[in-house]
Image: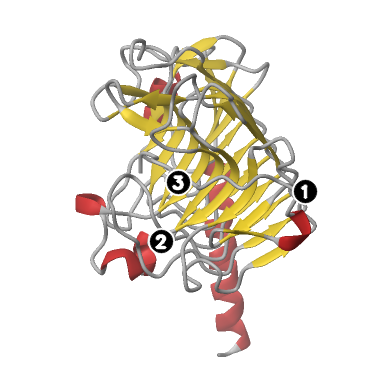
Amino acid sequence: MPRATLLSVLGCCASLLSATVAHAATLRVPAQYPTIQAAVDAAAPGDRIRVSRGRYCGATLSKPVRLEGHGRPRIIGCDSSPMIASSLRVGFFLPGARGLNPASGSRIRGFVFDGEGVSNTNLTPLAFGVFARFASDVVVEHNRFDGTVQAITSTAGDRWRIQDNRIRHLTLLDCTGYCTGGDGIVLGLGLGSLAAPGGESAPLNRSENNLILHNRIEGTAPDAFSAFSMVGVLLLSADHTTLSSNRLNLRDNPAADAVGQGILVSNTCCGLGTAFLPGSRFTTITFNDARQSEVGIVVDGTSGANTEGLLLRRNRGSVVIEGALQPTLAARRVLEPVRAQPSL
């Protein structure tokens, strides 16, 4: 390409980049917009939405935006909250289907998600904090989740960074009505009518290349509950996931038979009675502390379904691989895993 032509092309690209950067704006809630949803609706892709201290309903994201909380604004359950399964409230919902999500590239930072007290007899608080389907390149960092049945959920999302969040008082819906939850962070498989063509082996339906770093997750199963396990981080047929330096306190409740698992790497869930293949592959689990969990790390399955490319290094807490407690930790009691049942 002649030099003059190359310079013209570079100049054109630089102009476009400058225009894109110049176009990005900061929208302020509540100074300019009374609700987060109003700011999202008014924003252009890439805009920053700065939310000040206060109590706010959540929002549905239909474009990539940077949501930044200042002074720990609290996201609460409202009549106008986004909904899953018609009556389960969500803080920030990134809906997508069949491999597409218009909110890919969003960032969520600095919020408190209030799900304290959520149960089948009280669905007013948030059941879910951040819930996305087929969204990629999303950052969720430096947030706090109080209660909720699933704090952070990414179904078939790629290249997420979930970092420095705190999930407290994690709970579940106990099957007296809805029967789901008990999971702090879920990287799930796209299934059913929302899935892209190709089934569970299609890359568009699988979570790939995600990072889960420096999060603190704690919860305990309710008394007398036994239907499924509680899990700090659940990987369901997810590929190339890195989990590092997380603290996982999924404690034993002597009054409940449900098992508390710090990290669960699996290819079965949701009461579907089937195993999805391939399973979770090329998972890296390092420097996590799950000593306060009933079972620290569980790699589920048989015949290598979830051990392909598995790397475990310098974690604390018990490790169970394909039903066998690892010999160096044989003093810990082994409990038969009960399948997790997240919403995807």
Q: Position of residue 249 (x, y in %)?
A: 67, 33
Give the crowd class for mark 2: few <14, some 14-19, many >=20 residues within 10 Å. many
Verify CB contact (< 8 Å) between mark 1 and mark 2: no
- Give the labeled residue for mark 2: 206
Residue nearest the viewer, comparing 70 with 319: 319
Circle 1 or circle 2, nearest the eye: 1
Q: Quadrant of residue 242?
A: bottom right
Q: Residue at x 44, y 12 (%)?
A: 34
Residue nearest the viewer, comparing 264 with 202: 264
- Give the labeled residue for mark 3: 154
Q: Position of residue 121 (x, y in %)?
A: 33, 11
Circle 3 or circle 1, nearest the eye: 1
- Earlier sequence position, callout 3 versus callout 2: 3
Q: Quadrant of the C terminus?
A: top left
Give the crowd class for mark 1: few <14, some 14-19, many >=20 residues within 10 Å. some
- Earlier sequence position, callout 1 versus callout 2: 2
Q: Secondary structure at mark 1?
A: loop
Q: Quadrant of residue 140?
A: top right
Residue 316: mark: 1
In the figure, 7 relative to 113: above or below? below
Residue 185: mark: none
Q: Amino acid at mark 1?
A: Arg
Residue nearest the viewer, comparing 286 with 111: 286
- Earlier sequence position, callout 3 versus callout 1: 3
Q: Quadrant of the N terminus?
A: bottom right
